[in-house]
């Protein structure tokens, strides 16, 4: 049996279900450590890959990759935090979290905040995780925290990590113990085999304290999307000049969506992959920024940094597996772990920690910026800036607001630049698997009218990623999604070429916008499968 969107003749993993769009395949979880018991509190969902994205068959995801995807979860993230608590400060992993711009509207809508306030709340939460990781071990307690000698907060944390049961406290109280009873709903005492003692209240990380065993930096990943869009703009203009009937360089298909790129590389192959934009995705560029530029700025070795991405979809977990830092040794990954917005929100809802809002960090020191987005009609924001840049560079036309025309459905739209009745540029946006199928079919048949297509695997764009805005039964939360769209549209838009920080980074980090180092760091090559996909295999 095959799922509705499967493109192969046979599939060993997919099965037909009543709800094709929401069916999912459980990736195999890593074997538990010896002696590990499942705690009552650990209820976080494991990573899943959805059939509607056509990313669960042998052509796209191997068994080994499935295990690696499963390992990217909140449990692994907290494990690193816990290891920091047990190590000397000189051996701490420095934790940096980068938040995708499409994730912030989810937190804002879910917690009824503005995008700016949501970013501050999220940042404060991630940094306050130290409050239950940085447990105060009483004098005389063993360094390895033997079960009978663990503090109450240590046992609560181990329960959360699934390493020990903690029947004495409930789900909410467990983390309240860890935070020193900060919510006021529990007594805030702990004992060590003797009479209970009053534990000092948690007062946050003091300015002169030693480096905490928690999240150290929280970044907005919008700056990485700036680089990706700027490089895509230059590549489209170059392809437009190089295009000919004998050697077609157009259309250019975007490569920022990992689900789409994985499908194109593993299943479609030629003639699709030559049309993929070579600019690296925002997640890949953010990995290089953190592990290369920021590490050197902070005088840190890259392997001391543990980089986490908060993203709207599970496909980015797959992308992290192939996300090498070009300037580092082969196999060195720019992102160590990807957590979806929903996974972080679940942590926030279950924690009951007293959180102090905190401003997002930047790669440049103490400079703070308000939340912003790329000016475009979609949640990805890629089509509009590339269209405006091409119109100006190629035809000296200044384009203001874009007027889209819906085609088959609201997720398949086009925009054109015309002069004297002649179409100079024709761009399209194709979101969701069915629209992608139509794009590929036209491309294979040689009847493709577009110069550029923004392709996203998720219907509705990145805001509708499977890692956020979902109900408990796995369906899209339409009411929440509607609020997210309104919140995202209200965020001020700004063209990436106007960012002074990006221009500074081109000079300081990449030796100039056109230098070999810039091309190596910001571009990649797309590989096809062993053989091209047979069009007869594709169920249109």
Image (tube, rainbow, N blue to C red):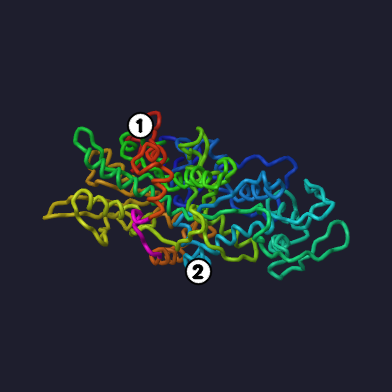
Horizontal side of residue 38 vs 467, given as left or right: right
**Nearer the camera: disc 1 or disc 2:** 2
Q: Secondary structure at mark 2?
A: loop
Horizontal side of residue 223 vs 62, given as left or right: left
Outermost residue on the left side: it is 420
Quadrant (top left, top right, bottom left, bottom right) of the C terminus: top left
Residue 532 marker: 1
Q: Which residues are magenta?
A: 491-499
* Residue 282 place in picture, x, y as percent: 43, 48
Asked if residue 91 lies in the magenta stretch, the reply is no
Q: Does label 1 or label 2 sit earlier along the sequence?
A: 2
Q: Which residue position is annotated with label 2? A: 113
Circle 2: is it few (<14), some (14-19), or many (20+) Cα within 10 Å? some
Q: Secondary structure at mark 1?
A: loop
- Marks 1 and 2, Cα distance to the nearest angstrom? 48 Å
Circle 1: is it few (<14), some (14-19), or many (20+) Cα within 10 Å? some
Relative to 506, does residue 536 appear above or below in the rendering? Answer: above
Q: Is residue 441 visible?
A: yes
Viewer-side residue, 449 vs 237: 237
Viewer-side residue, 447 vs 81: 81
Viewer-side residue, 302 vs 286: 302
Residue 505 marker: none
Looking at the rendered structure, the number of numbered marks drawn on it comes to: 2
Whether the residues at callouts 1 and 2 have beta carbons within 8 Å, the answer is no
* Residue 386 place in picture, x, y as percent: 30, 51
* Residue 188 place in picture, x, y as percent: 76, 66
- The residue shown at (39%, 48%) is 227
Q: Quadrant of residue 169?
A: bottom right
Relative to 204, does residue 86 appear above or below in the rendering? Answer: above
């Amino acid at each position: 049996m095959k799922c509705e969107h499967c493109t192969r003749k046979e599939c060993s993993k997919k099965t037909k279900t009543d709800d094709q769009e929401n069916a999912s395949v459980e990736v195999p979880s890593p074997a538990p450590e010896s002696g590990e018991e499942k705690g009552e509190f650990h209820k976080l969902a494991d990573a899943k890959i959805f059939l509607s994205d056509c990313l669960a068959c042998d052509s796209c995801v191997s068994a080994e990759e499935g295990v690696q995807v499963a390992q990217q979860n909140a449990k692994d993230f907290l494990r690193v935090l816990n290891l920091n608590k047990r190590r000397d400060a000189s051996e701490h992993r420095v934790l940096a979290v980068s938040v995708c711009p499409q994730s912030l509207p989810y937190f804002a809508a879910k917690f009824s905040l503005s995008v700016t306030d949501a970013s501050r709340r999220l940042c404060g939460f991630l940094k306050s995780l130290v409050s239950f990781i940085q447990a105060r071990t009483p004098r005389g307690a063993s360094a390895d925290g033997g079960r009978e000698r663990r503090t109450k907060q240590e046992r609560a944390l181990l329960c959360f990590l699934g390493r020990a049961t903690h029947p004495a406290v409930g789900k909410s109280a467990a983390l309240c113990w860890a935070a020193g009873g900060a919510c006021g709903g529990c007594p805030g005492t702990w004992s060590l085999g003797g009479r209970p003692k009053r534990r000092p209240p948690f007062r946050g990380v003091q300015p002169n304290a030693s480096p905490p065993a928690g999240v150290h930096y929280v970044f907005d990943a919008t700056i990485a999307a700036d680089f990706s869009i700027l490089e895509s703009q230059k590549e489209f203009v170059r392809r437009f000049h190089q295009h000919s009937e004998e050697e077609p360089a157009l259309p250019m298909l975007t490569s920022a969506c990992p689900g789409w790129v994985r499908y194109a590389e593993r299943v479609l192959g030629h003639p699709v992959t030559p049309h993929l934009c070579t600019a690296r995705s925002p997640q890949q560029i953010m990995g290089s920024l953190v592990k290369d530029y920021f590490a050197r700025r902070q005088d840190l070795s890259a392997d001391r940094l543990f980089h986490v991405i908060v993203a709207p979809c599970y496909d980015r977990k797959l992308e992290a597996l192939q996300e090498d830092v070009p300037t580092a040794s082969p196999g060195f990954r720019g992102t160590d772990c990807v957590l979806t917005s929903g996974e972080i929100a679940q942590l926030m809802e279950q924690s009951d920690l007293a959180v102090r809002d905190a401003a997002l960090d930047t790669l440049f020191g103490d400079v703070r910026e308000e939340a912003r987005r790329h000016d475009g009609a979609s949640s990805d924001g890629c089509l509009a800036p590339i269209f405006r840049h091409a119109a100006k560079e190629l035809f000296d036309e200044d384009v203001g607001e874009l007027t889209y025309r819906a085609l088959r459905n609201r997720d398949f739209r086009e925009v054109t630049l015309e002069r004297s009745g002649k179409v100079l540029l024709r761009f399209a946006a194709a979101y969701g698997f069915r629209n992608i199928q139509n794009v590929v079919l036209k491309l294979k048949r040689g009847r493709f009218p577009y110069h550029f297509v923004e392709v996203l695997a998720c219907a509705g764009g990145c805001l509708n990623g499977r890692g956020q805005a979902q109900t408990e039964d796995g369906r899209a939360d339409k009411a929440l999604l509607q609020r997210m769209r309104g919140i995202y549209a209200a965020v001020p838009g700004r063209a990436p070429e106007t960012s002074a920080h990006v221009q500074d980074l081109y000079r300081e980090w990449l030796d100039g916008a056109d230098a070999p180092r810039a091309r190596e760091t910001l571009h990649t090559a797309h590989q096809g499968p062993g053989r091209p996909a047979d069009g007869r295999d594709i169920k249109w």
